[in-house]
Each structure stands twice: as structure tokens, then as C-alpha cells.
Image (cartoon, grey):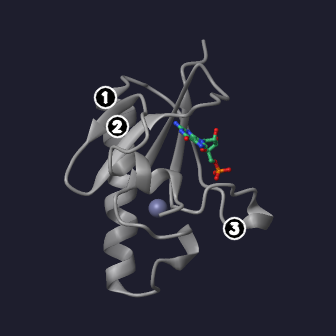
């Protein structure tokens, strides 16, 4: 298994975990680009956002992911406002090919 986020999900790599449920995990980015920089990651390995199927299954997966982003940002991190970023594909600046949403915030 080569995927770093799968390794974090499996507990084989350490991470500063802030949230976990049956389907998602959230942890601090190792190279934070904001005072608070957390990644929300589905536990299932899907390489990139555009790989979710264009059907109701994909809609549920996308809804679940962004619902979790809101929950982590507001409830876990206590952010009143935040920036959400998803890099999609090499040409979109994606470096880790396991779907993740960046939550950036904590600016004064
Ligand atoms: P991407 O460009 O793929 O959207 O962003 C990947 C992010 O994952 C980067 O911000 C990078 O700092 C972060 N990252 C890469 N490897 C690790 C790791 O092993 N642990 C953690 N916590 N973050 C990582
Ligand atoms: Zn993975």
C-alpha cells in the first residue's frame, strides 16, 4: 500500500487527528498554509474528486464529504469562517492522490 492517507487511516502513519467517524478522518496538514490547516479525508481510497461517479452514489459521497467538512470546521475547530480547497488532478495542483478537502482558517 503506497498511499500515505490510507496509511494514516490504518494507523500505520502518525497524524495529528482532530476528528474521526466511521467514514471520515480529519487531521492537521503536515505543512500548514494557514494558522489552522486541516485535511478531511474519506476512509475509502478514491484518488481524486473527479473520480466520484456522476450519479446518486457520487452525490451521496460528495454530500457526506462536505457535510463532514462543515462539521469539522465549525464544531471541532470552532471556526466562524474558513476557506475550503480541493485540488483535483496533477494540473490542479494535487499531490496526494487520495481525495481530501483542505480547511484553512484561523486568520485574525
Ligand atoms: P494536495 O496538493 O494533494 O491537495 O495536498 C496534499 C496535502 O497533504 C499537502 O498540503 C501536504 O502538506 C499534506 N501532506 C502530505 N503528506 C502528509 C502526511 O504524511 N501527513 C500530513 N498530515 N499531511 C501530509
Ligand atoms: Zn488512499
Residue 56: percent from left, percent from top? 33, 84
Q: Quadrant of residue 75?
A: top left
Which residue matches tag 1? Answer: 76
Task: State yes or no: Cβ of the residue under disc 3 lies below 8 Å from any atom of ligand 1.
Answer: no
Which residue matches tag 3? Answer: 89
Residue occupying the point 34% across, 46% down:
25
Mark with earlier residue (2, 3): 2
Q: CA distance from mark 1 to mark 3?
A: 28 Å
Residue extending farthest to the left is: 22
Residue 65: percent from left, percent from top? 37, 58
Which residue matches tag 2? Answer: 72
Is disc 1 in contact with disc 3, using a CB cutoff of under 8 Å? no
Q: Quadrant of residue 83?
A: top right
Residue occupying the point 54% across, 69% down:
47
Q: Residues within 10 Å of mark 1 (few under 14, many from 20)?
A: few
Q: Residues within 10 Å of mark 2 (few under 14, many from 20)?
A: many
User: Which one is nearer the viewer's eye here, 4 or 91?
Assistant: 4
Is disc 2 in contact with disc 3, using a CB cutoff of under 8 Å? no
Q: CA distance from mark 2 to mark 1?
A: 5 Å
Amino acid at each position: 500500500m503506497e498511499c500515505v492517507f490510507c496509511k494514516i487511516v490504518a494507523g500505520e502513519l502518525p497524524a495529528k487527528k482532530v476528528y474521526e467517524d466511521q467514514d471520515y478522518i480529519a487531521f492537521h496538514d503536515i505543512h500548514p498554509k494557514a494558522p489552522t490547516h486541516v485535511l478531511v479525508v474519506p476512509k475509502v481510497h478514491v484518488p481524486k474528486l473527479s473520480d466520484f461517479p456522476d450519479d446518486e452514489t457520487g452525490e451521496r459521497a460528495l454530500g457526506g464529504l462536505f457535510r463532514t467538512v462543515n462539521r469539522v470546521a465549525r464544531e471541532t475547530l470552532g471556526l466562524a469562517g474558513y476557506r475550503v480547497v480541493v485540488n483535483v488532478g496533477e494540473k490542479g495542483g494535487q499531490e496526494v492522490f487520495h481525495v481530501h478537502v483542505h480547511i484553512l482558517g484561523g486568520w485574525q
